[in-house]
Amino acid sequence: MIDNYLFQFNHDLNGIEKPTELNNPFGTTIPLVAQIAAREFQEFIASEISNWEHNFDSDKGKMFGVLVVQKANKELAFLGTISGKLSGDKQCEKFTPSVFQDSKDDWYINKGMKELTQIGNQIELASHSQKAKLKDIRRQKSHDLQNWLFENYKFSNLSGLEANVIEIFGNSEQGNPPAAAGECAAPKLLAFALANQLKPIAIAEFWWGNTPKSEERIHKAYYPACKNKCRPILEYILEDNTLFNVLNFS
């Protein structure tokens, strides 16, 4: 099963220096082996993109990530995934999966989202006096679903300890997790590697597609992991609560 998610290098890595420690996900230095993995993953994206409903030219682009790993036999391979999800719940079987599976508790979150949609439809048809009550019900239902989701996003650290997103952020300066915490590329890649005894060697994230109006993003350019969603999770996974202060990351 693990091999289904591993990409084998097409590039000859002889003579390519292998990092002795994982590069800082929040830094700007990308090891050469990670750059090679990113280029090969970009070729894969280009070959598969016609199967996805997301139009990366006209719609907002997405962040992708690669993690070079060392297998038990010492060979190098890499994992690749997307931050968030593809449009229309499309799946790519080669993408490293989320730590949260939609099928959990008999598709609880999917059923909950359908209920929210139904309540929204009721609001459209309700009288003025009913709308406020229905909106309160929808707000509470949405809050409960978000909490349930965060409780079931569980990450393990290098020592094998496990914590969910609420616990991880509760022990950080941020306190409350933002929406979609846990779905970024770096946490998914590192969580999968550690869960499957793959040694992380080098990591890189890049933007693919159209530039959003709200922020500067260049197609295929490298970017550090986001701090508001990823920092507490990555610190927990890597058991490094001082790295970012030492390197003056704020």
Image (cartoon, grey):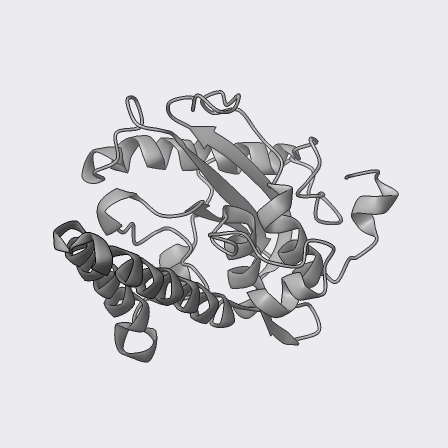
For the N terminus, the quadrant is bottom left
Number of disc labels? 0
Q: Is residue 217 visible?
A: yes
Q: Taking 51 as reference, is 92 left or right?
A: right
Measuring 18% from the left and 60% from the top, which residue is drawn there?
118
For this orientation, the residue located farthest to the left is 125
Q: Is residue 90 visible?
A: no
Q: Which residue is more in the foreground, 80 or 70?
A: 80
Q: Which residue is more in the foreground, 36 or 162?
A: 162
For this orientation, the residue located farthest to the front is 129
Q: Which residue is more in the foreground, 188 or 183?
A: 183
Q: Position of residue 107 (x, y in %)?
A: 27, 72
For the C terminus, the quadrant is top right
Q: Which residue is more in the foreground, 197 or 12?
A: 197
Q: Taking 49 as reference, is 100 left or right?
A: right
Whether 159 is drawn above or below 61: the answer is below
Q: Position of residue 172 (x, y in %)?
A: 72, 59
Measuring 46% from the left and 36% from the top, which residue is drawn there?
63
For this orientation, the residue located farthest to the bottom is 105
For this orientation, the residue located farthest to the right is 246
Q: Position of residue 89 (x, y in %)?
A: 25, 51
